[in-house]
Amino acid sequence: MSAVTDASGGPVALARRFPPDFAFGAATAAYQIEGAVADDGRGPSIWDTFSHTRGRTRNGETGDVACDHYHRWRSDLDLMAELGLRAYRFSIAWPRVQPEGRGPVNQAGLDFYDRLVDGLLERGIEPWLTLYHWDLPQALQDAGGWTDASLADRLAEYAGIVAGRLGDRVGRWITLNEPRTHAFIGHAVGRHAPGGHGWANGLRAAHHLHLAHAAAVRAIRTVAPEARIGVCHDIAHVIPASQSVDDAGAARRHDGAMHRWFLDPTFGRGYPSDMVEWYSSNGLLEGLDLAAVAGAEPIDFLAVNYYRRERIADVPVTPDWGIGSSVLSGVGESTGNGWEVWPDGLRAVLSRIQAEYGTIELAVTENGATYPDAIGADGSVEDAERRSYLARHVAALADARDEGVPVNAYFVWSLLDNFEWGEGYGARFGIVHVDFPTQRRTVKSSGRWYQELLGAADAR
């Protein structure tokens, strides 16, 4: 198959390729949509600090208001119901629950999520809860952040608090969102909070994120034994940029660093030996107890975020990028931020996980694209490119299911245009347009396409 995976027949025909209980949904993250950063006892997070630091984000933009979801959650849930969402993936803001990241619980923060979960269930929408989507309480960062091994205990304490309050109604739990992105983009190259540098620093953060995931799984199971628990890894479809030996080696290292360094420990294999050898030869693993990740806590499902294919070329190793690889610009069709559009990569990634790690339930918890939105004179938003992107990726997902891959959920990223981390408000991924000065929501044509798909799925 090619980048133009067949999505002919429209949303009705596509819906017929999925079982009646398939969980079609949309995803968001707390700091990207909630706003209200100082309301009701919420403490500061590393993203509050990072976005308020000069030069860190596009145009100095912050998540102070974002989509104002904290105040508009009821109407946002009504919008989800209108679209026909069967499931909603959201994250808990750790500093809203524990302002200092440890110790006393902020009951007002927990109350917000209590109301949110009840509101979802009242509308027939299944909550999928992510515990940690990168917004570490600043107080914990001041004490060392993810470079400090004690953060595993802190995440476990927080997980137990949230599960103790919501575990009677939330069945799906994701401990961490994209630990490799948080570790390397946040701690090795500095483009995300907390803005750290050095590949050894990123590897140290990654190691402690592994340990924290396992501790959180144990904590959730203690207070919510019926919970189904997973972790979310972002996985690209990686190929060498050329047929050269050097590029093939770089692609292998890139996959090892970005994917196998996280998947292998998740599935109880410890760190991949080829990457241990590579990092050790470059002096990047000093002080880490590598054996500590070997005994992984079993998970019930794997959450997968997929966006693009990556063509990898060999480049020199640098202190901030310790794997000697470079992701080249996409060829052919690309999204608004230059990511190569390759829908069949989603099928390939899901099939690869099953082939290499065994049969486990999979959920696609993020998939989407940013493009410039064209707002019509009547206020409508026509986004044909995003609509096509989604249609072809859902078709690729159906192809994976046809091959026997047990994937049972799909979440569009994102429900709303939002604060897109370092890109501020300049990258719009939503199927719902947000006019940030007025907070007006307008369902885009991609959202109406998704609504039609879900309506056809419900009519089966």
Image: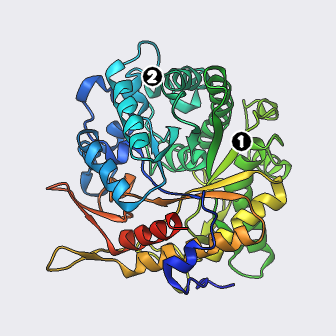
Q: Which image quadrant is residue 204 in? A: top right
At 44% from the left and 35% from the top, the residue drawn is 92
Q: Which image quadrant is residue 321 in? A: bottom right
Q: Specify whether 289 is left or right of 308.
A: right
Q: Earlier in the sequence, mark 2 or mark 1?
A: 2
Between marks 2 and 1 in the image, the one whose residue lies nearer the viewer? 1
Of 93 and 256, nearer the camera is 93
Q: Label 2 neighbourhood size at 10 Å, few (<14), some (14-19), many (20+)? A: many
Tag 2–tag 1 contact (CB < 8 Å): no
Which quadrant of the figure contains the N terminus?
A: bottom right
At 14% from the left and 56% from the top, the residue drawn is 438
Of 174 and 182, nearer the camera is 174
Give the labeled residue for mark 2.
101
Camera sees residue 257: no
Give the labeled residue for mark 1.
300
Say what secondary structure mark 1 lies in.
loop
Where residue 381 sits: x, y (%)?
Answer: 26, 74
Which quadrant of the figure contains the C terminus?
A: bottom right
Q: Specify whether 359 is left or right of 323.
A: right
Say what secondary structure mark 2 lies in.
loop
* Amino acid bearing label 1: Asp
